[in-house]
Every structure is written in structure tokens, then in C-alpha cells.
Amino acid sequence: MITLVFADALQPFLPPARRGGAWRLPAPPDASLKHVIEACGVPHTEVGAILLNGQPAVFADRAAEGDRIEVRAWSAADLHAAHALRRWPAPEAMRFIADAHLGALARRLRMAGFDTLFRNDFADREIAALAAAEGRIVLTRDRGLLQHRAISHACYVHASAPDTQFSALLERLGLRPGFRPFTRCMVCNAPLEAVDKGTVLDRLPPSVRERHLRFTRCSGCGRVFWEGCHWRRMAQMLDDA
Ligand SMILES: [Zn+2]
């Protein structure tokens, strides 16, 4: 038999009857720790560290009769710890790809300045390929997607409300030092550039033309943004998070 002990943060992935204590099961013949952990329902991307009989281990290590395997989640506090299973970029360099159900979360990340790919028709294999090719962190509520071998960095999104999803992600990845609010288009993800009022005058509603002074234009889709009440509402939301 082997004994598995999962961190509290990983408990929601276990079958309900297995939550709470240690899980003893027959030692699988020649299985990697990654395989054993995923067979219990926990995506490998949620695992931050593994202790095999008290010693730091990696996914490719094998489980043998009598082993005790402690499985830890990752969090902002130990993202860059020596025993961490993967290297993470600094917050200001973090880039994301969100699955089809997380459009509202993607918009919030863009608003805070993070490069975040989102389309509502991405196939799983496209998400995995883009994440691997461009070094993006996958955001999803789909455990199946996280089993993809090509995905090394991901964050499972537990909450269903976008504001809660956003603040949980900020906390778990320690994103705040990477904030660059209003530098990226919420609609298409391209960088925004400052523009003179004169050059966009003909595209502004009269009330905006009179009241506002600072404008940005999206380098991708050409939309013009100004510091109006929408802007203030977004700033408030970032503050709250
Ligand atoms: Zn745009």
C-alpha cells in the first residue's frame, strides 16, 4: 500500500468520500507520481510540491510499496521556493490564456494590463499549444483540460463570479506588482497608446468632447477610450481587488 496526503487546497479535487484524511491505496506497478496524483483527481498543474517519504520529489519519480506521498498546492508564498515543481515568471511578465467560459475574467486581467488571450471558440488542444508556445498560464474551470501534458502552468478557477475569480487569482499568483492599469484593450488585448484629443475629436460623443482631456487608442482595434465614469468604475474595481 501507499499513503497519499493532499493539502487542504487540493481536497476539492478528490472524490467526496476521500476528502479529509490520508488516502491508502495499493501501490500501482511502476507508476509515476504524476500518474498516481492525477488518478486521484488532482490536476498536475495544481500541485506545487511533492514530498516522497519526507524528501522533495518530482513528477517522474515512481511510487513504491510503503511510500508516503505528501502533495502540496502552490500559492503566492512558495511560487519561487527551491522545492517548487516549476519556475514561474515574475508577476509583470505573467501572460495568460483563458478558456471559453472565462471571458469576464479575461477582460479584468486585460484591464489590469496583463496580456490575456481569450476566444469563445478555442479548442482544448489550441489552448494547450498556445500556452506551451507562448509561455502562457492557462485559466480554466475544466479539469480535463489541465490533464493535457503540454500544459505546465495553469490555475484552476474555483469561483463562478468574475470579481471573485479575479481577486482569487491576484492573491494566488501575487499579481499586484504586475498591475499596469489601462495599458491594454479590454476588447482585443492589444496595447493602448496615448493620443491627442485633436486626432480623435470626430469619434467622440459631444458630452465626452467637452468634458474629458485624456484619451488612449487601441493599437489593434482602434477603439478610443477616455477617463470617464466607466474608467473610474474599473479603477475602483482594481482597488477593491
Ligand atoms: Zn482593441
Image (cartoon, grey):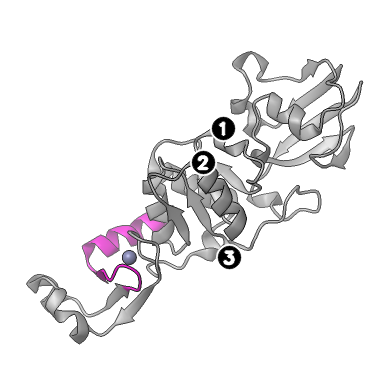
Q: Is residue 21 visible?
A: yes
Image quadrant occupied by the N terminus: top right
Q: Is residue 240 visible?
A: no
Q: Amino acid at mark 2?
A: Asp
Q: Which residue is the site of mark 3?
A: 93
Instruction: Identify which residue, 159 or 237, lies in the foreground.
Output: 159
Q: What distance separates the C-alpha of mark 3 from that of mark 2?
A: 24 Å
Q: Amino acid at mark 3?
A: Ala
Q: Is mark 1 within 8 Å of ligand 1?
A: no
Counting from the top left corner in percent of width and height, residue 205 is at: 11, 70
| Numbered label attached to residue 144 | 1
- Residue density around tag 1, few if under 14, some if 14–19, many if 20 or more, within 10 Å: few
Q: Find out whether residue 239 is within the magenta segment.
A: yes
Count of residue discs? 3
In the visual, does 60 lie left or right of 47?
right
Q: Amino acid at mark 1?
A: Gly
Q: Which residue is the site of mark 2?
A: 124
Instruction: Identify which residue, 241 or 54, lies in the foreground.
Output: 54
